[in-house]
Image (cartoon, grey):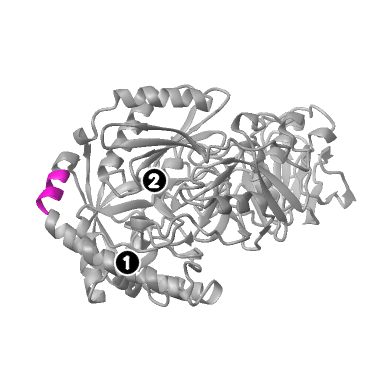
Amino acid sequence: MTVVEAPARVPEPEATEDAVARVEVVRPGMLVTVQDWPGRVGYWHIGVPPSGPMDDLSFRLGNRVLGNAEGAAGLECTLGGPALRFTTATWVCVTGAPATVTVDGAAVEQWRTVRVPAGGVLEIGAIHGPGMRTYVLFAGGIQLPGYLGSMATFTLGRFGGSAGAALRAGEILPLGAAREPLTTGVPADDRPVLTERWELAVTEGPHGAPEFFTRADFDTIIGTDYEVHFNSDRTGVRLIGPKPEWARTDGGEAGLHPSNIHDTPYSVGALDFTGDTPILLGPDGPSLGGFVCPVTVVAADRWKLGQLSPGDRVRFVPVRREHAASLRDLGPGRRAAWPSVLSPGGDGDDGVLRRAEVDDETGVTYRRAGDDGVLVEYGAMTLDLGLRARVHALHQHLLAANPRGMVELTPGVRSLQIRVDPHMLPVPKLLELLAEAERELPAAAELVVPSRTVHLPLSWDDPSTREAITRYMHGVRADAPWCPWNIEFIRRMNGLATVQDVYDTVFGAQYLVLGLGDVYLGAPVATPIDPRHRLVTTKYNPARTWTPENAVGIGGAYLCIYGMEGPGGYQFVGRTTQVWNHAAIETPWLLRYFDRISWYPVSAEELLDMRADFAAGKVEVRAEEGEFRLADYRAFLDGNAAAIDLFRAVQAKAFAAERDSWRITGELGAD
């Protein structure tokens, strides 16, 4: 793939019928972005979300009646739209949530093809509901250079569209060659029904009852009308609802809260419990994280996420995977015109498709990840690099086999998510292929992979991370056990004598990169190779709404570098330089699977200078070639078993004491 930088502003042409079609942004609107469909597919494994229209159905229907390809780039308008001046006469179609739409001041209908004259102004007013997003499609589609294969705007990552951001006044959007519309408008039977009380078709899994949630929890999840929280966006729709009872007391090495698991790939549309807070993950959401997801919205119903408004009510309705509507269908078969989801029930298997034994010591569980994916999990819920080796072997096997219909592969710590086009590769057929693959994989102990040692600066307890904690205390909660200082909380949870011991442990460790995209854009999830360096913490509950770019945090037994600003839940230890280079042509991500991160200390002022130099392309990161051999690593563990056991015993005692104090204060709920 080729990365193309955003273009400079195109000079405004004169309004003439003969000029190449262009659109001038007279008024940009509140949050209007260029999107295409299906967006930026193929980069989930390194933390690049697909983006694209949040309501794909309204977007694709508008393109279809204009005679465009369904995915041709158009505009997504949140809460209100722009005013646009056209240099040539152009056909447009405005779809999605109802809003006041005018051409040169005269009202025009939505869902109809409308011809805007040369020099004419199309204006989209405030959305008056129900719904949240309106779409503007143009005959010929918007034509801009792509980034990683798509024009879709990802504002948090600062790429896509014309400048990696929402529209700005004065911007010029070039359009492609167009033909006459196919029809006068979208048929009424094809248009989605927008409401204030929604039903979403979901499949069970990947992580449901009784392993993670109680049966009563699951009954509550599918029997409750949740309320849409005002703090929702394209990354995820936050919901207000009952607190789960939970089937576990904690997440073990993954974290103190029972919602915590070893970092695993997410699905768009998954109901992600970040602690006790449920969030429906959107098309700009993270690809990897450490929280459980009991149900997943089926692909054909995910358009509804784009129209959920604050205060709306949401009910989850389980359906059988094979009964889910098709994402390909834009007509009545999509069932978007039905206000209710008609279903006799779900699959009734708790999201577990199959269990098997890999060898005498290791099992494998195949979990449902929506109607278009499978999550493969190896072994018990423990941190074992042998399990990551097994994931790597399966990942490489499937990449080489490249079965028709496989869309994306995303590895986690002990898991691999496989996304498919179910029309080309149905999930039952995928399970057969996975069973065959297990018989062909080499023994995990044979793993030998390239493993660079990458030296990165770390500003310890950086002022930006202190600011994030302060914002959290003012805007989310001030009584959290990890406030007001995350590093002191880490010390307490691990039974260390002083904060200096935390410092020495972090700088003395080598962190092995197990996954990328943990918090977007090549951000690593890594764990110390030596278990005596594995500081264990829990994650924020609820998560932060803001984290500075390239903050460094620890959650469970894992460390991550936040690839960009955004939400987050890991406990801060400091900040480093960028792990994503926007100017890179081929591979903008810095790190690779099985790299080893080694920290060296810098001051906050030095880090700011280094970050500026890195952004300007003036910094070379020092990296030494090497390899990681699982057999050698296991020999190291055997040779240091006594010291490792002693460290873990002290840590476990402190972990248990913290958990007990949480129970006393009600942090984990009543016994």
List x then y, in percent, for residue 98: 81, 50
State which quarter of the image contains the N terminus. top left
**What residue sits right under mark 2 in the picture?**
588
**What residue sits right under mark 1 in the picture?**
655
User: Vertical placement of 354 versus 171: above or below?
Assistant: above
Q: Main secondary structure of the magenta part?
A: helix
Q: Amino acid at mark 2?
A: Pro
Identify the magenta region. 633-640
Q: Residue at x 56, y 39 (%)?
A: 39
Q: Which of the marked residues, 1 or 2, is nearer the chain's N terminus? A: 2
Between 418 and 351, the residue placed more toward the observer is 351
Q: Secondary structure at mark 2?
A: loop
7 lies left or right of 311:
left
Q: Residue at x 80, y 48 (%)?
A: 122
Q: Are marks 1 and 2 in contact (CB under 8 Å)?
A: no
Between 528 and 399, the residue placed more toward the observer is 528
User: Does residue 244 appear in this view?
Assistant: yes
Quarter-of-image position of residue 377? top left
Task: In the rendered structure, find residue 647 and report the number of the disc placed on it.
Answer: none
Quarter-of-image position of residue 618? bottom left
Label tally: 2
User: Does residue 405 appear in this view?
Assistant: no
